[in-house]
């Protein structure tokens, strides 16, 4: 199974397997600089029965940046900057892609001291169906010291983070894209009929405990 979102810094990549086409699907990336290191988040969106166009990819990349600006930056440290959003068709190996960089980089606006870059908060992306393949995660970066006490994220901050991720569903829907979890394998083997998509219906915080991305540091 490939998770629908990740954050990392350093040399670790997220494309360890050969290319496998996912019909009518676009990969959406947010590229940041966090404490001087590269970091990213990723989701997948389904865009209907046809091949994604370059124009649609541009629209999605623009919407991804707008969503971050309107929902995330006030919650994230000024030591994190969004520097680019990118939408890439994975419906075909050499499909269209688009990047959005207008007005970027833009930093978060929380001026409180930042926590270490490997500290994140995991939000579960749910489809309403059972099984690990039907769930994804978004690792929220850029937490600050005033948001966390003894490894526990403040309840109000958790509510705001979950609301931001719920709003991502609507932001993508507004441009004709449906947030999905893409599952490439089942029980450790490639799915015989190809990747399966699960529609994300809501975001959920399983607990208030911070998560470590220690394994993704240099």
Image (tube, rainbow, N blue to C red):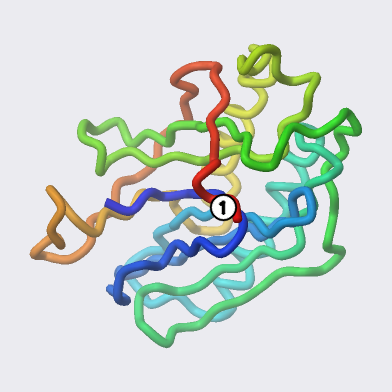
Query: Residue 63: in sight, yes or no?
Result: no
Q: Nearer the viewer, residue 48 or 193?
A: 193
Residue in view at x 66 percent, y 73 percent? 99
Counting every numbered tag in the picture gives 1
Residue 54 vs 162, above or below: the answer is below
211 left or right, relative to 18: right
Q: Position of residue 176 (x, y in %)?
A: 50, 58
Q: Which residue is mark 1?
A: 8
Up-down relation of residue 49 to residue 172 (above or below): below
Q: Quadrant of residue 19?
A: bottom left
Occupied quadrant, residue 117: top right
Q: Position of residue 114 (x, y in %)?
A: 80, 34
Is residue 167 visible in the rendered structure shown here? yes
Q: Residue furthest right?
A: 111
Q: Residue at x 44, y 39 (%)?
A: 137
Q: Residue furthest front?
A: 218
Residue 42 in picture, x, y percent from top left: 52, 55
Residue at 37 percent across and 49 percent down: it is 3
């Amino acid at each position: 199974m490939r998770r629908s979102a990740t954050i990392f810094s350093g040399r670790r990549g997220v494309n360890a397997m050969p290319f496998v086409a996912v019909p009518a699907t676009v990969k959406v990336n947010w590229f940041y600089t966090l404490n001087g290191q590269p970091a990213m988040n990723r989701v997948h969106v389904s865009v209907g029965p046809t091949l994604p166009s370059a124009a649609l990819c541009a629209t999605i990349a623009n919407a991804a940046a707008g969503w971050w600006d309107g929902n995330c930056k006030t919650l994230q440290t000024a030591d994190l900057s969004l520097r680019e959003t990118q939408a890439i068709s994975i419906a075909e190996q050499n499909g269209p892609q688009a990047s959005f960089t207008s007005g970027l980089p833009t930093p978060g606006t929380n001026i409180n001291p930042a926590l270490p870059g490997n500290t994140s908060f995991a939000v579960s992306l749910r489809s309403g169906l059972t099984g690990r393949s039907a769930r994804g995660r978004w690792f929220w970066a850029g937490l600050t010291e005033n948001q966390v006490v003894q490894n526990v994220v403040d309840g109000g901050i958790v509510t705001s983070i979950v609301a931001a991720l719920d709003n991502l569903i609507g932001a993508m829907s507004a441009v004709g894209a449906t947030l999905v979890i893409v599952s490439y394998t089942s029980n450790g083997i490639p799915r015989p009929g190809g990747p399966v998509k699960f529609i994300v219906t809501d975001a959920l915080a399983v607990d208030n405990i911070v998560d470590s991305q220690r394994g993704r540091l240099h």
